[in-house]
Amino acid sequence: MTQETAFLQKSPDAGDEHVPARKVFVKTYGCQMNVYDSDRMSDALSRDGYVATDVLEDADFVLLNTCHIREKAAEKVYSELGRLRELKKAKASEGREMVIGVAGCVAQAEGNEILRRAPAVDLVIGPQTYHRLPEALKRARCGERVVETDYAIEDKFEHLPAPDKAKTRARGVTAFLTVQEGCDKFCTFCVVPYTRGAEVSRPVAQILADAEKLVDGGVREITLLGQNVNAWHGTGPDGRDWGLGDLLRRLGEVDGLARLRYTTSHPRDMDESLIEAHRSMAKLMPYLHLPVQSGSDRILKAMNRRHTTAEYLALVERIRTAQPDLALSGDFIVGFPGETEEDFEDTMRLVEAVGYAQAFSFKYSSRPGTPGADLKDHVPEDVKAKRLERLQTLLVNQQRDFAADCVGREIDLLLEKPGRLPGQLVGRSPWLQPVNVDAKRSQIGDIIKVRITKAGPNSLFAEVIE
Ligand code: 5AD
Ligand code: SF4
């Protein structure tokens, strides 16, 4: 939809007259689940006649979908709210309304505190109550300062609209689909069990219905999402208990769906059935995000990760035996309280031993309310910074080596969107690397055979195999 036609879309309570649709600007921080949630919230608002805009100044409703995982992420939200306050004032002086909402994990964790710290905020809504957003927004527009952070008893997924065909088309040929939310693991550094709540799996039928809708809207690749996605479980149509492996096999039968991925996994929940899916399913991409956080058993124990480095390495070995082509990605935290130089060297050794195709690494950030915050021996910031630099150098080198090893390989490439140069498209390799290739726009959504010819710092280049 163009900006202009969007503007002229009829709002449902507009009678026969064409009135300008109200506009919503959504800014998403943090993880892929927030990206998915932002789309679901936009879909819910579109039932009330709202259309999405990329132009902040035009928005009648600005919604920040926030992340609380590290202090920096949460603080970014407050600086953005400071800027929005000025914009809201400027608009008010012209007689134009701008409602400001905060959703996501900062909303859940800080609730009323946000209203106190950021007086321009009209609405705070936590991840478990997104289906109530349209109603909450109506109340906010009537002048109420709304806080919706209860864990709702009703199933939000039953009340949120399923993916819509036209919008799915506009969003592209790859899509996220939440199958599991929340976490019961309680790693001592992590806010997720408190912000996203207890582990909940969506039922098979609901997931299948959403997947079919996405495919109907042109999606070729679905990434199943969950904070602990491999803990997903449900009852299959056959009455058996299903795990993620069974769900993937069933999704593999959906006509038109070419590729499947899932993220994020916990090492404790990689069961044999899921490993078997990697061995036997061509549609399941050979890529696994399997965070380990640290290579020191002492620190893993203090983090409450519930596994040792030896168990992690043995698991990696089993998965690689099942799927030798698998690329691994991971998350690491340096400077967890009590981490010594020797513990950090253990992390470096583990990274050397595994060899990651991609990785995310962070300085430990103490989060209020988590057990880690109460631990003694916090590591000084400058020590954390030095360790992070060393670890990132190693990880970047591994990523570069992995990309270099791809040169010369023939792969299937899913063409996703226009590239930077005219006449080019960008797709994703099975290992999630962006790949540039000469192709026509009409080929978006096709999977073509290409040969990798060159590896750049952040993407690969390929030629089409006739
Ligand atoms: N400090 C630093 N990194 C963290 N992560 C989670 N909590 C913290 C924290 N308090 C990292 C972990 C996790 C990723 C999503 O974010 O590595 O896997
Ligand atoms: Fe956080 Fe650990 Fe749960 Fe992952 S498994 S969301 S790191 S508590």
Image (spheres, grey):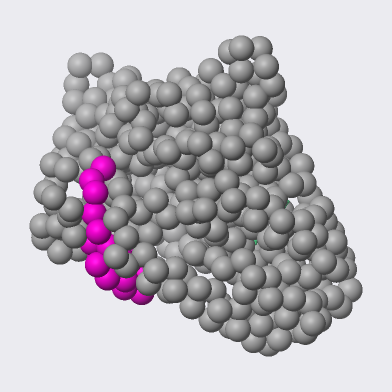
Q: Nearer the viewer, residue 21 or 249?
A: 249
Instruction: Determine whether 47 is above or below 89 in the image.
Output: above
Q: In this picture, is 140 found above or below 317? A: above
Residue at (62, 66) in percent of width and height: 354
Q: Could you say where residue 32 lies in the image, as x and y percent from the top left?
A: 50, 48
Residue 394 image position (x, y, % from top left): 56, 79
On the question of residue 271 being in view, the answer is yes
Q: Which residues are magenta?
A: 447-462
Q: Position of residue 326 (x, y in %)?
A: 50, 53
- Residue 90: x and y, percent? 36, 59
Taking 28 as reference, is 389 left or right?
right
Query: In the picture, residue 39 is in which quadrant?
Result: top left
Residue 387 horizontal side relative to residue 437, left or right: right
Q: Main secondary structure of the magenta part?
A: strand
What residue lies at 72% left-to-right and 56% top-to-bottom? 314
The residue sitting at 41% across, 47% down in the picture is 26
